[in-house]
Amino acid sequence: MPESTVPWLQSVFDLMNAVATTDARAMATVEGWSRRTGLALPAAVSQFYTTRVRIPLTDGGAWHLPLPELWREFSGEAELLPLGEVLAGLERAGRSGSSGPVADPVPAQWPPLVYFERDVMAVHHVFFAADGTDDPAVHAHSRDPFQQPGWSREGERFSGWIFDWFASYYDDDQCPASFWGPEATVTFEQAEERHPDLPYRNGLWARAVDLPVGDPVLADLSRRFGPARRRSWAGGATRYSWPVPGGTLQVTTDPPDHGGSRADHDGSTGSGVPAEGGGPAGSGSGAGAPVGVWWLHGTTTEVFRRLLSALWGHPTLARTLRNSDLCVHAEGREIIASLRA
């Protein structure tokens, strides 16, 4: 099965209106560590730590920063471990079965875990599984009196966990922190005039990680929505965007000759519903079967519902299109649920 050229975190880049490139310095760190240790950082985790993003600003400029720094702009003061500590943690996990500050032993049936994030009160710690998968499961341990204490498994794998995090803070009035937070580097008036262009704050969006989009689908979408704008990424993936009045329709997909679909979130491949992810941004070297990543948005509920309805008949989109349970606006989820009903 050919490797996917679509980034593992493509849904994140779509939500954040970002163009991703490889952070050469961070990539060199990962590659040097891998040569020294013989270990491999999971592909989706590696992409998160080795990607830079470019986000347009409303004054026509652009905001350039590493993806972990963008995460911190939407972190709500949570703590993300730096790359070096994550690499060291993965080494420790290989020797002792886990890494991190939690005293409770990891359940025996779980793989070794690598600590990478905690909340501001240091009572909720998050780990990814060191089990050899490209997009590992995410586990958490909580000592928060308002949550179920002890170990739990998060609902999403790493790429989906990162996406949900951004979705949960996307419409926060103090994010991005450099523009709106208490430690903003610009005045409120300056931020009003020049801030990141984040057009999806009404929550009327849906995404899907689905089958690769071949020529017949591209032709059908162009027949119904007009000629597509096409942009090729360095790794081989292509993003197609169609003109939708009051909305957004774009698909980032592997070349049509790749074929196949990615495994489910539970690791199986039987249902044909692909899981999150793809190869590293700009490299095309990540594992995982080919995919197409869809992004839909409407400026009004009418546009969003009409766009969803128009695409509902494509082979598996009715099952794979979704919003996020952590998006502060529920209307997008409700519209998707009403169509399914």
Image (tube, rainbow, N blue to C red):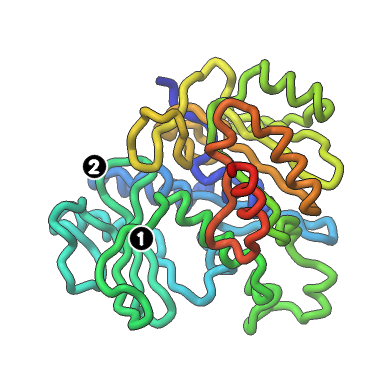
| Residue drawn where x is 35% and y is 73% of the image | 124
| Residue drawn where x is 53% and y is 74% of the image | 76
- Say which of 29 and 210 sits in front: 210
- Say which of 162 and 96 sits in front: 162
Residue 84: mark in rendering: 1
Tag 2: amino acid: Gly
Q: Residue 61 in the image: state x and y as whole percent.
A: 79, 57
- Element at label 1: helix
For the N terminus, the quadrant is top left
In the picture of the structure, the residue carrying the numbered disc 2 is 38
Q: Residue 51 in the image: state x and y as whole percent.
A: 53, 49
Pointer 2 and pointer 1: residues touching (CB < 8 Å)?
A: no
- Say which of 337 and 31 sits in front: 337
Number of marks: 2
| Pointer 1 local density, CA inside 10 Å: few below 14, some 14–19, many at least 20 | few
* Of the image marks 2 and 1, the number of the one nearer the N terminus: 2
Tag 1: amino acid: Gly
Separation (CA) of disc 2 from disc 1: 16 Å
Q: Residue 314 in the image: state x and y as whole percent.
A: 63, 27
* Residue 88 at least partly seen: no
Figure check: 75 above or below 320: below
